[in-house]
Image (spheres, helix red, strand yellow):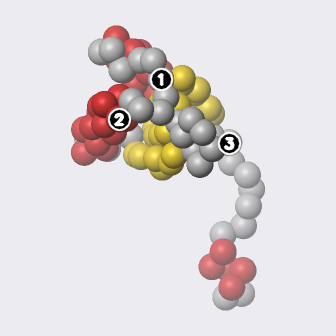
Amino acid sequence: MEALVICEIAAGREDLREALLARIGRLGLNGRAKLSFAARDRNPPGNTLVAVGFPRQAEAERFIAEAVGDGLAPAAVRLLAVEPTGQAEPLPLMFP
């Protein structure tokens, strides 16, 4: 099952943001992960959220363990399982 990791990085920790994005970029080159988004909260204090997708939950868990082991904490990390929604594809709806 696909997994999504969401990391919340405290405002002012650009070093941590850049380190996480670099790690995700290296994984992406090998096809092991894909950056879903990076966004800054518009409300103070302006924390940054980084979401990265993995093809399997085990790979997401390994990413979290390695990142924490390499000192990329103190980001708050959540691991989510991606579930299918059963939503129809847009093209068949547009061109029946």
Question: In this figure, which residue is indicated by the disc labeled 2?
Answer: 14
One can see residue 93 in this view: yes
> Given the image, on which type of amino acid does mark 2 rest?
Glu
Badge 1 element:
loop
Does 42 appear above or below 18?
below
Whether residue 51 can be seen here: no
Query: Looking at the image, is 36 positioned above or below residue 9?
Result: below
Task: From the image, tell me which residue sits under label 3.
Answer: 83
* Amino acid at pointer 1: Ala
Q: Secondary structure at mark 2?
A: helix
Answer with mark 2 or mark 3, whichever residue precedes in sequence.
2
Residue closest to the eye, 27 or 21:
21
Quarter occupied by the C terminus: bottom right
**Residue 87, position in %: x, y?**
73, 61
- State the mark number for residue 58: none
CB within 8 Å, label 1 to label 3: no
Foreground mark, 2 or 3, reads 2
Left or right relative to 60: residue 15:
left
